[in-house]
Amino acid sequence: MALLSVDELSVTFTAKGRKDSIAVDGVSFDVAEGQVVGLVGESGCGKSVTSLALMGLLPAKGVRIGGRAVFDGQDLLTMSPQYRRDIRGSQLAMIFQDPLSSLNPVVPIGVQITEILERHRGMKGEAARKEAAHLLDRVGIPDPARRLKEFPHQLSGGMRQRALIAMAVACAPRMLIADEPTTALDVTIQAQILELLKELVDQEGTALLMITHDLGVVAGLCDEVNVLYAGRAVESAGRRDLFTYPTHPYAHGLLGSIPRLDAPRGEPLRPIRGSINDRIAWADGCAFAPRCDRYTMECLTGTPELTEPRAAGHQVRCVNPVLPKSKAEVSA
């Protein structure tokens, strides 16, 4: 049974005198306890806005939110602000993408961590400080006792990111939303953080929603993957199935653009042409059509629906998907 069930989530930004901007357009997915679900796509496809809507951190004005997001039997989109504050940080936590704007610049790191421990775990004084130092040590920050007294500007970008992660896991939440948690980290620390997230999932049964554009992270961590484009899921499949048989042209292009160590010397990269701005409205057809090498006139006859053209559980929003060539591959 899903701990979080998102059904037709939509987020529209409105402004007087301007056309509405649809950032998330009917996204649905489930996350169970002990499961890692990935949201993948280019910048601007709606990943971060989805996470902010689930956490209740979007502005109160100028935003219209629709759909449902049921967490442990309660709809996150309609619950009272007081109840949301009670579960946010304790049962549902988030690792933000930009640590410099997420941390309070005039408050020491130690105070920012201990206030979470005091608010949600009832810890006080020296006990809270020791636990805060332990959390910093757990995410790989050296000399944690000294770092507790420092301000965010005194830490490197990687240390600030690790401090955010320490704050997110401080209460061992039932569900963790990680928005590009390893962006500012070097490879060694990135591996350490991913191992910590795996430990939370495997040992404590934490549900993890991983938001990333790094397909290497997806390959090593996620169980299920949802590929987003222009606010909608265009492909949804298990990790192995997605990497073995990418079926939507966009997912196929994302995987094809990754440099390969086994590629012949001098072989050029195969980027997806155009940018995320080169799209049409979903109401007029497939938003990816202007960038797609498999474009046909049928792509403009209406909004494509999610179907299962290759295998059960592998959903694709495309009228001309990339299918395996042989019958043996189809039956695999």
Image: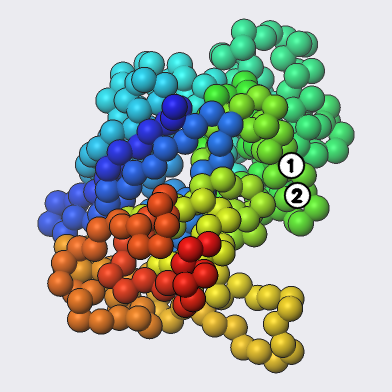
277 or 128: nearer the viewer: 277
Disc 2 element: helix
52 or 194: nearer the viewer: 194
Q: Position of residue 143 (x, y in %)?
A: 87, 34
- Answer left or right for 278 relative to 72: left
**Picture disc at residue 191:** 2
- Other-residue count near label 2 (Cα within 10 Å), few / some / many at <14 / 14–19 / ≥20: some
158 or 224: nearer the viewer: 224
Q: Which residue is mark 1?
A: 195
Q: Quadrant of the N terminus?
A: top left
Corner quadrant of residue 306:
bottom left
- Answer left or right for 48 relative to 298: right
**Vertical arrangement, residue 306 with respect to residue 289, above or below:** above
154 or 173: nearer the viewer: 173
Q: Position of residue 307 (x, y in %)?
A: 31, 57
Q: Position of residue 88 (x, y in %)?
A: 48, 24
Q: Amino acid at mark 1?
A: Glu
Q: Amino acid at mark 2?
A: Ala
Callouts 2 and 1 close, C-beta under 8 Å:
yes
Corner quadrant of residue 75:
top left
Q: Position of residue 308 (x, y in %)?
A: 35, 57
Q: Residue at position x 61%, y 12% from top?
A: 121
- Answer left or right for 144 relative to 171: right
Q: Residue at position x 68%, y 8% from top?
A: 124
Q: Residue at position x 40%, y 26% from top?
A: 71
Query: How many discs mark residues in the rendered view?
Result: 2
